[in-house]
Amino acid sequence: MDMAYLAAGLGAGIAAIGAGIGIGLIGKGAMDGTARQPEASNDIRTSMLISAALIEGVALFGEVISFLLAIK
Amino acid sequence: MIQNFRRVFLTGLLLILGVQLAIAAEGPGNDSNQIDIQGKLRNEYFLDFSPVFGKIQLPRIIYDNNGLHFFSSTTAAINSNSGLTDEYYEEGHSKIIKNGVIQPVTYELVKDDGGHIIADFSLSVAIVYFMLSGFLVLLVFIYLNKKYSEGVGRETEPKGVLQNMFETIVIFVRDEIALINIGPEKYLKFTPYLLSAFFMILFMNLFELIPWGESPTANLTVTAALATVTFLVTQFNGSKDHWKEVFWFPGVPVFVKPIMAVVEFLGLFTKPFALCIRLFANMASGKVLILSMIGLIFVFANKFGAGMAYGTSPIWIVMTLFIYMIKLLVAFIQAYIFTILSALFIGLATAEHEHHDAEPAHQ
């Protein structure tokens, strides 16, 4: 078997785990913030989306690399 | 009323999905239960309306060592005596099987008479849909411009579904994206760019969801072009403080400044790079996900026979529908994210700080 497929699968999974933890922490922070200060929920949502997008971007780098490994 | 609407909506959704399924299922040849996922990600040179209407080849414009050539289609290019050929090309076939693997006809032209192609300006699917969405944006804004010039929406209330809908989004982009991230002095200068970027990306993302549509944003070249525009807008409007922060970061010891300069200079390029990869990966992964879900039907057909494939296909169709809905959400979210991050970068670059070069006083 080609080890590249194994590497791609593992890499995709690990990148997803990292992004999941990161975005989960952001969601937790945003929920805490909104519960404490409901009037600031709009600002919090914007910053939440921005940070989630940044984390997602890093995770997607990993996914793209995995994809390239799998289809090389 | 609402129930009727719901019924019509669901029927329409199922119809669209059915056509999408038929398109995807057309992928594998009859003699092989393979589904060609990579082929769907490729930038083709024909518009594929296959199950119903067939394929429409797009014009090729090729600049080679003999000069510029115009052809009405790829077939015309191959049949002409310009020395252009395609090693996989076969009249009337979309895919051929070579060494047991599906080789889609890529329409990737090569010269067989020893010459070489210098540049390929051919229209591809991505470019066609890119232009189409640009044209749509133009139409929408000309329409809105006419309405507001007549005073509808300024002196009276906005009229009609279209104007109401777009006014909401335009004001959202202006107030929630541009104003917040760029600041009250300069945001009006950049609102046109952000609006164009938002609507272009939104339309391009939504093309994926209509039958036979292709999303140009699932193509790295298109997203790279979009990110380049953001990069240029950011750098050409950079304030003095921005360049000072890049090359001579204030407020850190002198020996750290060269290191910070390298990091900050690289940061100029990584930001648009991330922008480009993010949009591309989000759109392409949705495509791959839907095809993988449909591909599971073929996997089941291969492993357990046709009966199992028919039996389990409702599960995969429901899951495809679920991903389809997520893609609708992602289309809006990614347009929003691209625009808000562009606004953020522009805001960071154009910001002018009050000068406090002296070290902050320690209490």
Image (spheres, coloured by chain):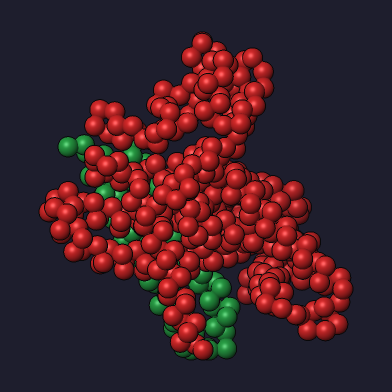
Residue A29, visible in the rendered structure: no
Please identify the residue farthest to the top as the structure is shown.
B114
Please identify the residue farthest to the front as the structure is shown.
B52
Quarter of the view holding residue B158: bottom right
Quarter of the view holding residue B123: top right
Q: Colour of chain B?
A: red
Horizontal relation, residue B282 to residue B135: left or right: left
Q: In the picture, which quadrant includes the C terminus of chain B? A: bottom right
Residue drawn at x 37%, y 51% as measured from the top left? B24
Give the x, y percent position of residue B332: 54, 66
Residue A24, visible in the rendered structure: yes
Q: Colour of chain A?
A: green
- Residue B68 versus residue B324 in the image, above or below: above
Residue drawn at x 17%, y 37% as measured from the top left? A1
Residue drawn at x 43%, y 28% as measured from the top left? B91
B79 vs B346, nearest the viewer = B79
